[in-house]
Amino acid sequence: MPIDKYIPNKLEIRQSIAPASIFIINWIVLFVLALFFADELRYKAEERQSSSSVIWIAKSLQSTAEAVGIKQTKTIKRLIAEDRLNEVSYTEESLPSAATATDNKIIVSKSNDPESKINEELVPESLKEHLFNNLEAPPVFVKPNLPEKILLIGASSMRSYMGQRLELEFSVLNRDTHRSAKLGTGLSRPDTFNWFEVAPRLAKEHQSELVIMQFIGNDGQSLINPDGTIHTLARSPLWDEAYSNRFGSFIQQFTDLGIEVVVIGMPMVENQAFRARLKNMNELIASQCSSKGALFVSLWEASQNKNGELRTEIRIDHRTYAFRHPDGIHFTKQGGYFMANVILEQMSSHYRF
């Protein structure tokens, strides 16, 4: 019998199996890549207003990527690329010295001195019983759930990439989200656009449970009344108090209705005089938020580089992008998306997403 009698059969089997294997492997690779770039696929689908089926597939990929941990891996990768890995910390919680009960015995935890030890036998029984009976568990902060109905309001940044990204992320979390923003507006000039009337009407219309707002940036001017008369001049020594009170009353409109409020502060900007003005206004509004029970989200630190200087560029996947537009104030697409992530990160310390 010829030695190579069965060789053609082997080749035939190999040829019939190889294409199928390659096809399956290609689909697996494509699926993994789709999960890794699920966020980008979702944003592209939304931006291009693709069909509902395409958007649904993109949402499903994004949810799967988050479930299997790919999204967290990309976050750490991005922080490494931006030299910001120190923002991801894994620390062991150290408990204060306290007595704990185990099998009816009292074990006293070590103090900060690793050499210090307490001989349990030398502790009187009466003291052990006192410690055990009076030991109280530390208070536990339970984060509330992120409200179901969210209203985003503000000016340019809320209208542009930062606001778009926030709206998209909240929709991914299945929150009923509405966004209303108007360029060049704020709380200083209700004679030109009155947010005191518009915002409560929007909140009522959408039955909002949480209002997220960003103003401040256009408010560094004389305070005008709705009828056009001057309330407080910009250079008046009374301006800080007047503006703070006006912002506080705006917040209280919502809190009185049981609506939660998140106020987004302004980032660092290029112009030194404007920067100092914004920093002062941020501090005024942060104080108002504290007194009114609102959450203040600071963007100041995130708008700096690691040297504490103005951030002008951002590294994403080993590529460098402009962080701001040439005016030194407004964010580029990459900058706006980055700031939206900063806002979500700070909110996640207060809300359970």
Image (spheres, rainbow, N blue to C red):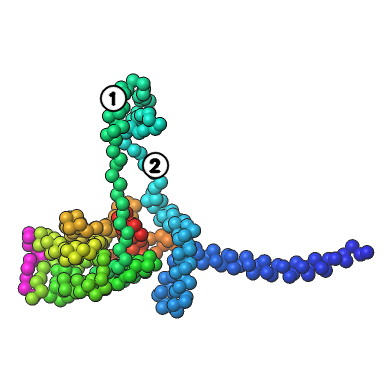
The amino acid at mark 1 is Ser
Does 32 lie within the magenta span? no
**Could one spot residue 336 in this view of the protein?**
no
Q: Is residue 140 shown left or right of residue 275?
A: right
Return the disc, 1 or 2, that comes first in the chain's sequence.
Answer: 2
Residue density around tag 1, few if under 14, some if 14–19, many if 20 or more, within 10 Å: few
Q: CA distance from mark 1 to mark 2?
A: 33 Å
Residue type pointed to by label 2: Glu
* Rendered location of residue 247, percent (x, y): 15, 63
Task: Determine the residue positioned at 47% across, 76% down.
Answer: 53
Using the image, determine if residue 296 lies above or below residue 104: below
Indicate the position of residue 14 as horizontal and vertical percent values: 75, 67
Question: Would residue 175 be found to the left or right of residue 76 on screen?
Answer: left
Q: In screen coordinates, is 2 left or right of 58?
A: right
Determine the residue positioned at 38% across, 60% down. 314
* Residue 33 x/y as whole percent: 53, 65
Instruction: Give 267 or 288, whichever is nearer the viewer.
Output: 288
Q: Secondary structure at mark 1?
A: helix
Q: Which residue lies at the image location 31% right of the left edge and 32% below the top edge?
A: 132
State the residue at coordinates (55%, 66%).
31
Image quarter (top left, top right, bottom left or bottom right) of the N terminus = bottom right
Residue 232 among those drawn in magenta? yes
- Label 1: which residue? 126
Q: Which residue is mark 2?
A: 92
Task: Give the SS element for disc 2.
Answer: loop
